[in-house]
Amino acid sequence: MPSVPLHPPHLGTSCGEWPPRPSRPPAPAHGACLPPARPPLLPGDRSQPSSIEGQQPPGPAPPGACPGSPRWLRPPLRPRRARPGLSAYLELGARSWDKGCLAGVALPLAPDQQPYGLVFDAGSTHTSLYTYQWRANKENGTGIVSQVEACSVSGECRGLPSLSRSLLDCCPKLSQQSIPAEQQRETPTYLGATAGMRLLSKAEQVLVEVSKAIGEYPVDFRGARILTGSEEGSFGWITVNYLLETLVKKWEHPQDIEVLGALDLGGASTQITFQPGVPVEDRNTSVFFRLYGTNYSLYSHSYLCYGQSQALKMLLAALHQVPQGTGAHPCYPQGYQENITVAELYDSPCVHAPSSASPGPVLTVTGTGDPAACATAIRSLFNFTCRAQGPCGFNGVYQPPVRGQFFAFSGFYHSLHFLNLTGGRSLSLVNATIMQICNSSWKQELFPMASRTQLRDTCTASSYILTLLLKGYKFNITTWPSIHFIQQVGEYVGWTLGYMLNLTNMIPSEPPTAVTELPRSIWIAATLLLAIMLILIFCLLTAMCCHRNSLGYEQL
Ligand SMILES: Nc1ncnc2c1ncn2[C@@H]1O[C@H](COP(=O)(O)OP(=O)(O)OP(=O)(O)O)[C@@H](O)[C@H]1O
C-alpha cells in the first residue's frame, strides 16, 4: 500500500488558523421548512423568493447566536488581471424569475475612482465578508475585478445579526485603508445566505435582523437574500470560469475553449454545475446563460443536507439508529471516544429523530477505525438507484454524464488538502491514503497542529468525498484526473464573486464592442501628413495671392 506523507494540517489560509467549530446549541427536532416565498426585505431588495430544493427536510433549527472571533483569511491581494464586462443577463432554467432580482444595477462610477463592492457569504458553518474592487472601461470596454480583502467569523448563519456586526466592526478597519472614506457610502453591499439558511425555519426573521444591523453601517446596502441551490451552483460556475477567463476566451475562440465545471462542497449542501455534452432533459436542473455573446446550457443541481457537516451528522445519527447500536463509529479512529447528547445528535433538520428519542441521554461514541464498515455506512446515506427517465446522480436526481474539466472547491479542497491529496493525485493513491488514514488509531501527537475535530473527521470527510464523487456524481478512474481540487485562482473560489459580477452588471450578455485604437506610430504619421498638407495649402494660397497682386500692379 503506497504511503503518502501527510501534509501539515491545513490551517485555513495564511492569515490564521481555522478555529475549531463551535458545537451547535441543542435544538428541538421538529418544525417547518423555510417558507417557499418571502416578501422583499428592504426597499432596495428586489430579490425573488428562494425556491427550496426537493430534499428540504422538516425540522426547525434553534435560534441563537453563535458568535465567533473575527479573523483575517488572508492579507490584501494585489489586483489581478481578469475580464469582467458591462451588464449581466442570466436565466436560470425555465423558472420564472423576477428580472429585477438578477438584472443587476449600475455602479456609480467616477472616471478617477475604482469602485468597490462588498459581499457577505452567510454559510452554514461560517460567515465571511469579501471586498472586491474593479475598474470599468478597461480593455475593450471590459474591466478588472479583484478581491482585495476577505475576513471571516466561524459560526452558523443562524447567528447572523451578531456575526454581521462583528464582521463589519472588524472589516472596515482594513477597509479604511482600501476603500477611500468618500467611496464607502456608495459601495454596494450584498448579503447572500446559502444552505444553512435554507434549512432554517426562522430564516426570514434572521434576514430582517441582519438587514437592520448592516443598514446601520455607512455602506450602500442592497439587501439580504437566500440563494437557491441552483444559484449557488451557477454563481460558483461563473466565478470559476470568470477567474480562468474562459468566458472571454470562448467568445474570442469559440471552438478551442472549453468551460470548466464546478463542484462545491459546503457545510450543508453540495453543488454540481457543468456543461454536459447532451441536452439537459430535466427542466429543474437546467440553467441557461448568455455571457459575452455565447449561450451556455448547463446542468446544475444542489443537494441539500449533503454538505460535509450535515452529511457527517446524518451518518452519526444513522449509526445511532442501527438496531442494537453500540455507539461504535467505524470512521472515527480507534481509541477515540466522545460523549454527545441525543439533543446534539438530532439538532439538525437534516437528521430525523426516531419518535422514541428523548433528548436527555448521553451517548458514548467510540471509534473503531474500520475502513470497509465506514465506506458501507457512508454509502447508506445515498440512494444510488436511478429512475427510468435517464442517468442520475443520486437520490433519483437526473444528471447527465460528467464531461470536461472540473474545479472542486470549498470542502472538497479542505478535506483532501489536509491529506496532501489535492495536487493531481491518482485515484488509486487517493483510495490508498484514505484507507490508511481510516485504519489508524487516535494519535493526536502526530498532528499537533490539527484540531481534535479535524482529526476525528478526516477519515469520515475524505471517505464521504470519495463516495460523493465516484458513486454520487459518477466520476470514474478515467474522469478522475479531470477534477482539480483548488481553493484559489488568484481569488478565493466560491459563489460570491459570480454573485457580485451579476448584481453589478459586470458580465455582458453580448461581447463588448471592440475599441479600435490606432497605434501611436500611425497617429504620429497622420499628424505629420496633416501638418505638411496644411503648410502646402498655406504656401499655395500665399503664392496665388502674390501672383494676383503682381497682376494688379501690371494692369495699373
Ligand atoms: N479553512 C478550512 N479548513 C478546514 N475545513 C474547512 C475550512 N473552511 C471550510 N472548511 C470545511 O469545509 C466545509 C465547507 O465549508 P464552507 O465554508 O464552504 O461551507 P458553508 O459556506 O458554511 O456551507 P453552505 O454553503 O453549505 O451553507 C465545511 O464542512 C467546513 O467545516
Image: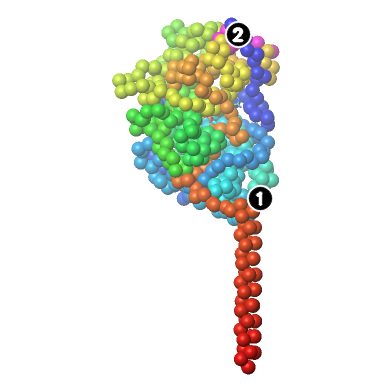
User: Quadrant location of the C terminus?
Assistant: bottom right
Q: Residue 152 bears which disc, if any?
A: none
* Residue 435 among magenta residues: yes
Image point (59%, 29%), residue name: 487
Per the image, label 2 sits on a secondary structure element best described as: loop
Res 247 seen here: no
Rendering quadrant holding ligand 1: top right
The kind of residue tagged 2 is Pro
Residue 513, percent across and down?
Answer: 49, 50
Residue located farthest toward the front when viewing the structure as drawn? 554
Neighbor class of circle 2 (other Cα within 10 Å; few <14, some 14-19, many 20+) is few
**Does residue 485 appear to the left or right of 302 in the view shown?**
right
The vertical placement of 152 against 108, above or below, is above
The residue labelled by disc 1 is: 180
Give 188 or 253, whichever is nearer the viewer: 253
Q: Position of residue 341 (x, y in %)?
A: 52, 17
Residue located 52% across and 30% down the image:
124
Circle 1: is it few (<14), some (14-19), or many (20+) Cα within 10 Å? some
Q: Secondary structure at mark 1?
A: loop
The answer to which quarter of the image holds residue 95 is: top left
For mark 2, what is the residue? 2
Q: Is residue 218 above or below residue 66?
A: below
- Residue at 64% of width from left, 53% of height from top? 521
Residue type at the position of mark 1: Pro
Tell me, yes or no, if residue 510 can be seen here.
Answer: yes
Q: Furthest residue to the left?
A: 388
From which residue to which does the magenta span run? 433-445
Of the pair 322 and 122, the residue shown nearer to us: 122
Whether disc 2's CB lies below 8 Å from ligand 1 is answered no
